[in-house]
Amino acid sequence: MKIVVCAKQVVDPETPRSAFRIDPDLMRAVPAPGIPPVVNGFDENATEAALRIRDETGADVSVLSVGDAFAPDVIKKPLSMGASELVLVEGPELADLDAPATALVLARAIGQMGADLVICGRQASDWDNAQVPMLLAEMLGAACLAFCQDVGVRGGVVAAQRVLEDGYEEIEADLPAVVAVSNELGPPRYPTLRGIMAASRIQPRVLTCASLGVDPAELRPACELEDLGVPEPGRRCEMIGGDSDAESGRLLALRLREEGLI
């Protein structure tokens, strides 16, 4: 069985606000100096889900990423976790794709690679759209199981637990299928020193839009981005005094009631 994990290189979501900057002309986030990008956290969960299936079934796990200016030490992290192959679709025209264009390129690459199961993170931490897994499944003509916290494959069927507000539900679909994994799956495994050394020796397979038959006209955004900026904080701090803890609590409650918060 062949599993393809879709992973994205993103700006580190832990970047301090003071170091975060938007280019108003290009309308994109400018990486902060000295703060390297990271693999999207949900995609690390997706890698973990694929490796658990591999540990049970012996499946082959490949990682696929679309973008530009990859940081080798960053994008190779899934390899150091245990994936066997890294495929990069790279080019300047892939730097700022919207969800439909990203799904299109992924679908063309997966069609060339072949896959029984595609596992994605539920969303990316840069745009938080959560659209690519569903669009990708539609383009591949496969079922999509979203917001999953547990994934397993048995006899040509993928079974998963879909996260709900008050629990989970058991769902399944015939292979091939696309599964979007949530962080409720649990923390991904840490790369071992052996895994890091092995990953350093693996050269990624690089594809281009031309090799996939993707016309640049197909990458035109479906939506027009009108503005992008960093929200300005609107915090106001008010100190509540009192001669005792009880008095402070009473005054706080009165103030909250005045604001209509309780």
Image (tube, grey):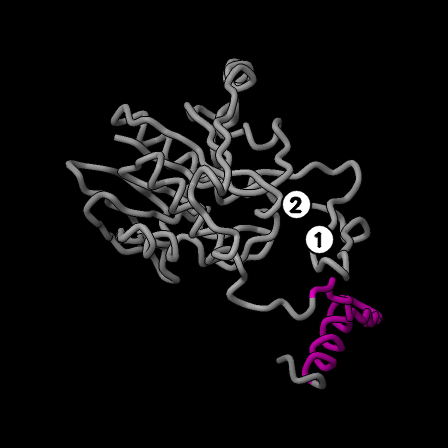
Of residues 53 and 256, the one nearer the viewer is 53
Q: Is residue 25 above or below residue 125?
A: below
Q: Residue at coordinates 41% horizontally, 38% vertically from top-left?
A: 5
Q: Residue at coordinates 22% horizontally, 50% vertically from top-left?
A: 172
Q: Is residue 248 magenta?
A: yes
The quarter of the picture where residue 46 lies is top left
> Which numbered circle lies on residue 11?
2
Of residues 31 and 104, the one nearer the viewer is 104
Q: Identify the amino acid type marked 2.
A: Val
Which residue position is annotated with label 1?
A: 29
Q: How far apart are marks 1 and 2 (CA)?
A: 8 Å
**Residue 64's x, y, as percent?**
45, 36
Query: Where does the N terminus fall, quadrant-wise?
Result: top left
Circle 2 packing at 10 Å, graded few (<14), some (14-19), many (20+), is many
Mark 1–mark 2 CB contact (< 8 Å) = yes
Q: Is residue 4 magenta?
A: no
Query: Where does the C terminus fall, quadrant-wise?
Result: bottom right
Toward the left, the furthest residue is: 155
| Pair 1/2: label in front | 1
Q: Give the range drawn in magenta.
A: 228-257
